[in-house]
Each structure stands twice: as structure tokens, then as C-alpha cells.
Image: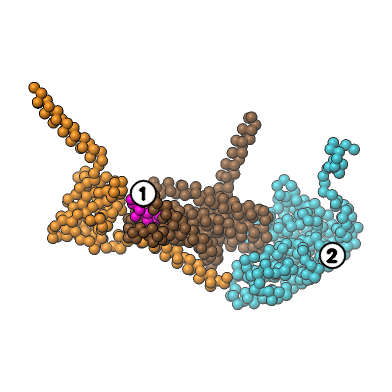
Amino acid sequence: MIHQVEIRDLNFGYGEQLVLKGINLTVPKGSLVAIMGLSGCGKTTLLRLMGGQLLARQGSVCVAGQELNHMNEAQLYAMRRQVGVLFQFGALFTDLSVFDNVAFQMREHTRLPESMIRDLTLMKLNGVGLRGVQSLMPAELSGGMARRVAMARATALDPALILYDEPFTGLDPISLGAIGRLIRQLNDALGATSVLVTHDVQESMKIVDYIYFVSDGVIVAQGTPEEIHASALPFVHQFVWGEADGPLPFHYPGPTLRMDFGDERGQA
Amino acid sequence: MRGAWGHGLRTVGDTTLSIVGRIGAVVLFLGQILRHSGTSFRRFGLVIREVYFAGVQSLIIILVSGLFVGMVLGLQGFETLQSYGSSESVGVLVALSLMRELGPVVSALLFASRAGSAITAEIGLMKATEQLSAMEMMAVNPLARVVAPRFWGGVISLPLLAVLFAAMGILGGFLVTVVMLGVDSGAFWSQMQAAVDFHHDILNGVIKSLVFGVAVSAIATFEGYEAPPTAEGVSGATTRTVVSSSLAILALDLLLTAFMMKGWN
Amino acid sequence: MNRATLNLWVGFFVLLGFLAFLMLAFKVGNLNLDGSGGTYEVVAHFDNIGQLKERAPVRSSGVLVGRVHSVRFDTLHYNAEVHMVIDTQYHFPVDSSVSVLTSGILGEQYVGLDAGGDDKMLKNGDEIKLTQGAMVLERLIGQFLFNKAQEGGTDKTSTDKGAP
């Protein structure tokens, strides 16, 4: 079994506080894996670690068999050419047109003639159904369209690994379905491996091969969508069915109600 | 008592340390920019684009302010010199103040608030909307692709703007004193030519504006690149660019003037 | 904004900047006198040059005809050696004289050149023999006081003589 991404005993934190504790995670080649959890549980941090933008404190992060912690800057940049990332809100370059956004990496990294760049770019835009908006600026696109353009840009150089950061946030149900299908299609068509960080359970359950649940910096559950759906774990149940209170408390930890209201001495 | 004094002293100490630390950080950042400047010169189109945004778009404000400053200098100088019966020397006064001080300094101050703040806001917003992160993940170094071209665009633009400011100011002084107040045109130019030295006044003025260009561009790109990635952070960074560039310009001006008056050797 | 228009604007801007620089250099500055090459150099020795500096004007009848090129101390004659460059369009006889003068009461010092009557003209490298150094205020005052004292002294001796 070949793993595109392999994370072993990973610890990571900002300052004193540990955000990720003892993470073990593998993403087999060609699969589509989702990492789920509440907002702020360290999912995006995990994605940045896979892209080499953050380096692990302890443990190892391997992409395509290479350990990121031991790389110098040049090696990191070389590794990133094999990785496509879709950022949370697309992160399109606002000073470039849609066409130039998608063509950006081809112009930066290849010496292809302009005519070939044009053809490739239009093909990528056609793949996400947006060949018609090539001359618009990113500010003129709707949220869903911007997300799709960003997908075309992330896959412009046919990367071996595609990372998606919250691809479903802030989209209407139709765009949401379209993006979900595109993620699956791109993964299969390019023969790539994809990692999806999301908190949208229903949409991602339809498309992914395997799911990891992260809570409070620890992986609490994992399995195929069927296993997760049938899971009896209270946390997973709460998450999948969207219950307000459960193992994950509704209230942020703090002083008791009695201490905040009225009785300042906090006596019972 | 002692507590209050101690607190006050500590504040002074903290502020001093943070200012020194910030200057150091800008200098280190300047080194980083220089290290990643290869792309800017291999693909000079990137720099030309930034010369357009920093230089061409500041042209109007620089030309108009230059004209006004020159006119005011002409009026004030004429008023004062007339009482000594040497109103022809007004050309000397206008030219020397513009070449040595006002041209480089005022155009750098205007440039900091017009182009410097725009550079900070642009880079800061690119950071806040994750465009810089996205670029890094596309294996393109934002320092080379975004920061360095903007830096060089500023460094190239400012000396040109300062020269235009001075030329425009002399024209303004000429208009007010010769055309309106009736100073003799020949005396105006010849006295000026007799007093203004190419190396000592004109070249030194250009050197000053070049130094200011480096300082303002480095501060503007630094503040943008290090801005907290929020709306509040970017607006704060923009303000800091204008404030610290202005202080840097005036402090460097003092240093450079002192050096130039003593002579470099 | 397409690329060609952008480049055009930047080209225009850079050109404008260089034109302004040239204007400053030639119209405002004084890059025209020795820059054009049309000059010849003469030398003169002064016993005192006062505040005369390099690049000070050389005037004849008040017209700018050249500039002081360099000033140094001549260790052979123990006086100041001043090199001047004169524009080639102005010719002066070899017996012309130069003096260090002041423009106005507090103005800059310059070299005044008075033409002589000889048929031969000065050429590159020649020396002007007739020189008049700068007036030094302290010496003037000293001379004045000395003269006064002398006058006073003669008066006194005359009264002394007349006393007996």
C-alpha cells in the first residue's frame, strides 16, 4: 500500500498551547479523505502542516514518501509544485483576471509558449464549467464561481495531491452539490489524491472514501462513510446529526452561572 | 511615588526597545528583499507595472504640489530679499531650497502617503485574503513575486518624482517672481546658475531622494507583509507606514545633510 | 489597463523625469561652462584670496566669463595659486590684471578681470602677472588706525616743538 500522506505521532502548537496532540493519519494514493471537526479544532493547521507551511514540533509528516521536517526552503518549494491547495475563500489574486489566475502557475513554473498556456487554461476552466468568465476579475464573480475558478487554478499543473480547506463554506445548496461532484471528478480524472478539511458532514459523506474526526487536537473517530453513519460513538452521533448539546458541550468552560449572576462569592 | 516613576521609566525603556527592534526588523526585511530580487530583474515587466502604480499615479500630486511650493517660495523670498535690495537673488533661494531640501523631502513625504500607504494596503489585503499563502503553496515565493517588484518600483519612482518636483517648483518660482512680480528674467536665471552647483546641489539632492525611496519602499512593504491579517490590522499598518516613513525621511535627511555638508571624504 | 498602455505611461514618466533632470543640470545648474570643453585655463598668484572658493565666478566688467577651477597654496612663492577657466569666446590681452573682489557688502567673492592693452592674447596655461589680493577688513582697520595714530603723533610732536 502506497501512502500519499503519512503523519506519525504529530504534535504541534502555537506558543505554549498544543493544538494537535499525537495525530496518526494516512492518506492512500488515489483516495479522497475528509478530516472533520468543529471550527477551531486544528483542521486547517493540519492542512498547513501537509503543505509544509508549518513544521511539526514532534513526529513526522511525509508527503509522497518525503519527510517535510528535514527539507530546506528549496526542497519545500519543489515539493509544493506537486501539491494543489484550495483555500477557504478561494484566495484568487485580486489584481489578475480569471484567466491570468489559472495561468499563473504555468507562467511561473513552465516555459510553455503562450498559445499552449491559453489552451491549457481554457481546458482547466472548461473542466469547472467557467470558460465563459475568463476575462472577468475575481471581484466580479459570485462565491461559488470564485471557488470553482480556484479549483481550476489549484489543479492547473495536475498535482499529485490536492488539499481543500473548507470548500463548502458559504455556498448555496446547488453550488455546494456542484463543488462536491467536481472534487470527486477531479480526483478521479487526474488520478490524484485529495484531502478535504470540512465541517459539512452531509455533503462530504456523499463523496469521500474515508473520514477522520478531530476534536480538541486528537483524532477521536475514523472510518468509511458507512461506518461513520452507523457509528454509535456519542461524539460522532452528535456531529453527524447536528445536535446542539452532547459530549461537546454547548457552553464554553467558565465560571458557574451562579458566580456570574448575583452571588459574587459563588456560594451555593 | 517610586512605583509611578519606575512605571514611567519602564514605559520609556519599552518604547525605545520596540523602536530599535522595529528598525532592525525593517533592515533585516530589506536584506530579504535584496536576496529575492533576482526575479524582479529577470522579469522587468513586473517592476514596470509597479513603477506605473507608484510613480505615474503620483505624478499629478507631485507636479501640482511642486508648482505651489515653488510659487510660495518665490513670494516669500521676494518679500524678504526686496528689503535688502537683492530681489534678483530670489532665483537662487528658490532653486537651492528646492534642490537641496524641499524637492527630495516633500516629494518623499507625499510619496509615502500616496504610494507607500497603497503598497502597504495592497500587500496587507493580499495577506489577509490568504493570497500570499496561496502563492507560497503554488511554490512561488511572495517575497520575490509580490514584495520585491513593489520595492524596486518605489526605488525607481521616487528620484524621478523628486526631480520633477524641483523642476516644477523652479518653474512656479519663475512664474511668480518674473512673470508676476517683474524680477528680471536674465538676473533670475544667471544668479541661479552662478549659485547652484551640479555635484553639490543637484546630485546630492538626487542621492537623498534615492535613499528616501529605499527607506519608504522598505517600510511600506514591511508593514504590509507583517500586517495582522484582519481589516483592523491592515488599516493600522497603513497608518504606521505613513508615520514611520515620515519620521524616517526626516531623520535620514538630517543625517545625509550633515554628511554632505562635511563632504563625504 | 493593458500592458502596452501601461508601458507607454511608464516610458513617458521616465522620459519626463530625465528631461527634468537635464533641465536642472543645464538650465539651473552650471554644468555648461566647463562641460562643453570650450574653455582655456590661466593661472594667477595672489598674496591673499580672502574667501575665494572653487567654482567662484570670474567676471570682466561684471560679465561672467569663466570660473575659478582650483585654489592651492604655492609652497615656492608662499602665496595662493588660483587656476581659472575662461570661456574660449572671450579673449584677453596678456597684460590683463585680476583682483579678488566682493559682490555687494556681504556678498560672495569673485575674481575681477580687467583687460590690458597688449596685442598678444592670453592662451591656455598662461599666467596673469598683475594681481591684486582681497581686502582684509582687519588689515584695513589696522592701517586706518595706524594712519590716524601717525597723524595724531605728528600733531603731538608739532605741539611739543611749539611749546618751548
Q: Colour of chain A?
A: cyan
Q: Amino acid at mark 1?
A: Ser
Tag 1: Cα neighbours inside 10 Å, few (<14), some, or many (≥20)? few
Question: Looking at the image, is C50 positioned above or below residue A236?
Answer: above
The residue drawn where x is 58% and y is 59% is B119
Q: Residue A156, position in %: x, y? A: 67, 70
Q: Identify by letter the chain in brown.
A: B
Chain ID for label 2? Answer: A
Q: Nearer the viewer, residue B153 or A103?
A: B153
Q: Quadrant of the C terminus of chain C?
A: top left
Magenta segment boundaries in residue numbering:
B82-95
Q: Are marks 2 and 1 in contact (CB under 8 Å)?
A: no
Q: Residue C3, position in %: x, y? A: 55, 71
Q: Is residue B68 visible?
A: yes
Tell me, what colour scheme is on the image? by chain
The residue drawn where x is 36% and y is 61% is C27
Question: Looking at the image, is B180 positioned above or below residue A115?
Answer: above
Judged from the image, the secondary structure of the residue bearing numbered disc 2 is: helix
Chain ID for label 1? Answer: B
Q: Amino acid at mark 2?
A: Gln
Left or right, C86 with respect to B183, comes to left
Q: Colour of chain C?
A: orange
The residue drawn where x is 30% and y is 60% is C33
**Magenta region's main secondary structure?**
helix
Q: Which residue is mark 1?
A: B83
